[in-house]
Amino acid sequence: KQEVTQIPAALSVPEGENLVLNCSFTDSAIYNLQWFRQDPGKGLTSLLLIQSSQREQTSGRLNASLDKSSGRSTLYIAASQPGDSATYLCAVLISNFGNEKLTFGTGTRLTIIP
Amino acid sequence: NAGVTQTPKFRVLKTGQSMTLLCAQDMNHEYMYWYRQDPGMGLRLIHYSVGEGTTAKGEVPDGYNVSRLKKQNFLLGLESAAPSQTSVYFCASSYPDPAHEQYFGPGTRLTVT
């Protein structure tokens, strides 16, 4: 059974710092990995999606990497801002074409200190 | 383009009562999903649909039923609510292509007393 782990569960950093969020998964036979952002009391917003054949994806100040063989992904946030404060979730897709299933980690709650 | 919407946003039920949660999407997505989110457990898939008229069980389907009579709507029903079903419920949709991400609704917070 696929398990997705995000450590630490919470992280606080001063504004302006670069930071890395971690995601690990137990079964490397994934189709893709997706990073989401969740604000308190809100739904999930997709940030980046990395296909299994890709090594990284970038969007603005965000960069996500994927190492399938080691079962790890990282989300790098450059020049952090207070508006980046949220919970970040990673999820892996383990199959497709009619049997899609995203397995989620429990998230890292990020606080950017002004 | 409203994306994925959910009705209602909040609900309190008593044990044994029934209710239906409605999810609607206007992106012409084939796939739709229902998840529940509980503290410390992440999001777990309840049921999903790969197209109009189809449904399938996810990871935690017991106590729930679903229907997809129209492509744009996916209904989640609780026939006899239990306190263990207290949770935040999220609906999502996507194209039938793993290259595309899932889009989520704002959630429904359900409390069963």
Image (cartoon, coloured by chain):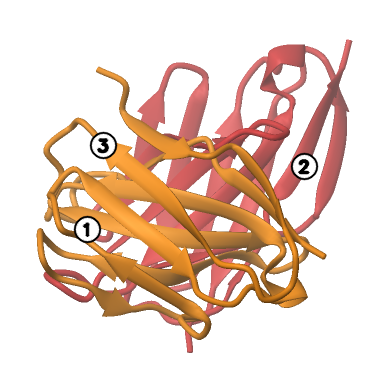
Chain colours: A red, B orange
Q: Are marks 3 and 1 on the same chain?
A: no
Q: Amino acid at mark 2?
A: Arg
Identify the residue under disc 3: B25
Label 3, label 2: how many angstroms apart (C-alpha)? 28 Å
Identify the residue under disc 1: A53
In the image, what residue occupies the spot 67% across and 76% down? B16
- The 10 Å Cα crowd at callout 1, few under 14, some 14 to 19, many 20 or more, is few
Q: Quadrant of residue A82?
A: top right
Label 2, label 1: how many angstroms apart (C-alpha)? 28 Å
Give whichever of B108, A54 is nearer the camera: B108
Give whichever of A34, B40 is nearer the camera: B40
Q: Are marks 2 and 1 on the same chain?
A: yes
**Disc on res. B12:** none
User: Could you say where residue A69 lies in the image, as x and y percent from the top left?
Assistant: 40, 73
**Disc on res. A109:** 2
User: Could you say where residue B55 lies in the image, as x and y percent from the top left?
Assistant: 22, 73
Quick one: SS at disc 3? strand
Q: Chain of mark 3?
A: B
- The 10 Å Cα crowd at callout 2, few under 14, some 14 to 19, many 20 or more, is many
Split into 4 quadrants, where in the image is the N terminus of chain B?
A: top left
In the image, what residue occupies the spot 86% across and 28% down? A13
Q: Amino acid at mark 1?
A: Ser
User: Could you say where residue A33 lies in the image, as x and y percent from the top left?
Assistant: 39, 56
Front: mark 3 or 1: 3
Split into 4 quadrants, where in the image is the C terminus of chain B?
A: bottom right
> Could you tell whether B91 is left or right of A97 in the image?
right
